[in-house]
Image (tube, helix red, strand yellow):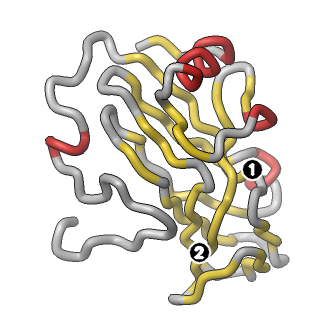
Amino acid sequence: MAVLGDRDITDMIAQGFLISENFSEKSITPNGYDFRAHLVRIEGTDFENVDLHPGKFALVSSMEYFKMPKNIIGNIWLRSSFARKGLIGTFGVIDAGYHGNITVGLYNAGSAPVTLKTEERIAQIVFSRLLSEAEQGYGTRSGNYQGKRGVVEAHDNKI
């Protein structure tokens, strides 16, 4: 696998891949893209701006709508500014062929509330090119969350 640089990322976006809605030039990094928070769900209630208190867990959806080609994956990493405040993130891989918003989990293990705001850069996605295109993309292989928008909770019967 090879990591995509900023030029690769912007070229792919211009071709209609990686991010198809709500792209922000300010979120491009030298080797990734910082996705932005759209909605935060805490204990079943959605917020645009909220303080995540110590010991609380939240689901956060991306503002961006992703359109991954079948030869690119995305690894998600919490931005260090949030880690320094005591947040711990639960992240997966954005699979080749996935289309939709992404939902990540954040837990406040710190001693003070952490403010989460709409359009705030939450985590970085590092895009990697597969050695060969996936034979079956996410939508065909599993597709549990394909095309989803907003905060999406786990499908209890699928996991």
Residue at image position (58%, 88%) is 45
Q: Position of residue 62 (x, y in %)?
A: 58, 56
The residue at the point 67 percent across, 59 percent down is: 37
Q: Quadrant of the N terminus?
A: top left
Compared to 30, does 61 lie above or below?
Answer: below
Q: Quadrant of residue 138?
A: top left
Residue occupied by mark 1: 121
Residue at point 58%, 37% (across, down):
125
Q: Is residue 135 left or right of residue 38?
A: left
Report the side of 98 relative to 128 (left or right): left
Which quadrant of the view contains residue 156?
Answer: bottom left
Which comes before the other along the chain, label 1 or label 2?
A: 2
Residue 74 in the image: state x and y as whole percent.
Answer: 47, 34
Residue type for callout 2: Ala
Question: What residue is pinned by disc 2?
Answer: 58
Could you tell me how far apart the alpha carbons at marks 1 and 2 are, in whole angstroms?
16 Å
Q: Quadrant of the C terminus?
A: bottom left
Task: Please provide percent x and percent y for residue 18.
Answer: 50, 32
Report the residue at 82% width, 78% height from top: 113
Question: Circles 1 and 2: CB distance less than 8 Å?
Answer: no
Element type where label 2 sits in the image: strand
Position of 121 compared to 33: left or right?
Answer: right
Q: Please tell me which residue lies in front, 116 or 101.
A: 101
Q: Secondary structure at mark 1?
A: strand
Q: Nearer the viewer, mark 1 or mark 2?
A: 1
Amino acid on which disc 1 is placed: Arg
